[in-house]
Amino acid sequence: MNWFEQVDIYCERTDFSYWSEPLNAITNAAFLISALVCWRMLRGQEDFPARLLTFNLGIIGIGSYLFHTHATQWAELADVIPIQAFILIYVYFATTRILDFRWWAGAAAVLLFFPFAFVSGTIIARVFGPLNGSGGYMPVALLIAGYGLATLGKKPAIGRGLLIGAAFLSLSLVFRTIDRDICAAIPIGTHFLWHTLNGIMLGWMIFVLHKARAPLARPAPRR
């Protein structure tokens, strides 16, 4: 693989200059702002999973910025790897914290995510077509919705929060999907809206996971 091979898959890009995707590049600030908001929310609180995801969210913003400015194979990996890491980390802690399963069930859920994503992604691609690469993210929306439905009975507020997250991701995927199809009508495309909404959605997902943590035990009153 040529790591410096140029990649042109977005409507806004017209050449391979650094600022050929200004909106796609600048709107990565949504991930950084969302990460900052989450970090401030967690200040003074012990919640390693939420902090880890918050740090990962900031890395997503940086990686995506690199991809939408450099537009190379190595920059695409800098974009994709942090996103995949966020998904897998969230699957583990959603299984152990939200569904209250043991650690080994969380590990199993992470491993099972790969065949689930492959099978469901393949079915989606055969039914709806390539969807401008969005088919790979649709299984994530389905999984979030599944966790939300499974949680509604025991933890209704958390279940609703997950369903809201799935709806937000679905909406942002619409803008990611139609980006190249509307180039003739809207030369700037709609990928920048995917960044904006997805940044909000990922921050919301961290918030939901944080709220699902077990309450700290209160110290026994002094006699």
Image (spheres, rainbow, N blue to C red):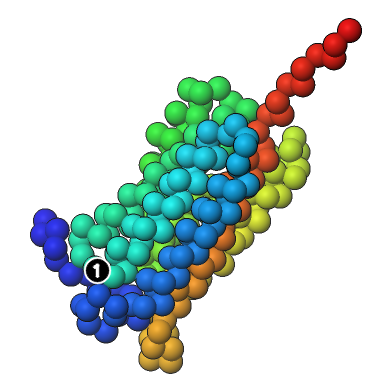
The N terminus: image quadrant: bottom left
Q: Is residue 216 above or below residue 223?
A: below
- Could you say where residue 127 lies in the image, as x and y percent from the top left? 43, 64
Of residues 40 and 132, which is closer to you in this image?
A: 40
- Could you say where residue 95 lies in the image, as x and y percent from the top left? 56, 33
How many residues crowd mark 1 within 10 Å: few (<14), some (14–19), many (20+)?
A: many
> Can residue 102 be seen here?
yes
Q: Is residue 46 above or below residue 9?
A: above
Quick one: which residue is furthest to the left in this view? 2
Q: Quadrant of residue 169?
A: bottom right
- The number of discs equals 1
Q: Is residue 186 left or right of residue 218?
A: left
Q: Is residue 31 above or below residue 152?
A: below
Provide the secondary structure element on which disc 1 rests: loop
Residue at screen point 32% across, 69% down? 68
Q: Quadrant of residue 190?
A: bottom left
Q: Which amino acid does the dot numbered 1 rest on?
A: Ala
Q: Is residue 204 left or right of residue 126?
A: right
Q: Is residue 146 left or right of residue 55?
A: right
- Could you say where residue 30 lies in the image, as x and y percent from the top left? 50, 64
Of residues 215 and 158, which is closer to you in this image?
A: 215
The C terminus: image quadrant: top right
Quick one: which residue is furthest to the top in this view? 223
Quick one: which residue is furthest to the right in this view? 223
Residue at screen point 41% across, 77% down? 23
Residue at screen point 68% across, 29% down? 214
- Could you say where residue 12 lies in the image, as x and y percent from the top left? 35, 81
> Can residue 136 be seen here?
no
Residue of label 1? 71
Residue at screen point 55% across, 22% down? 102
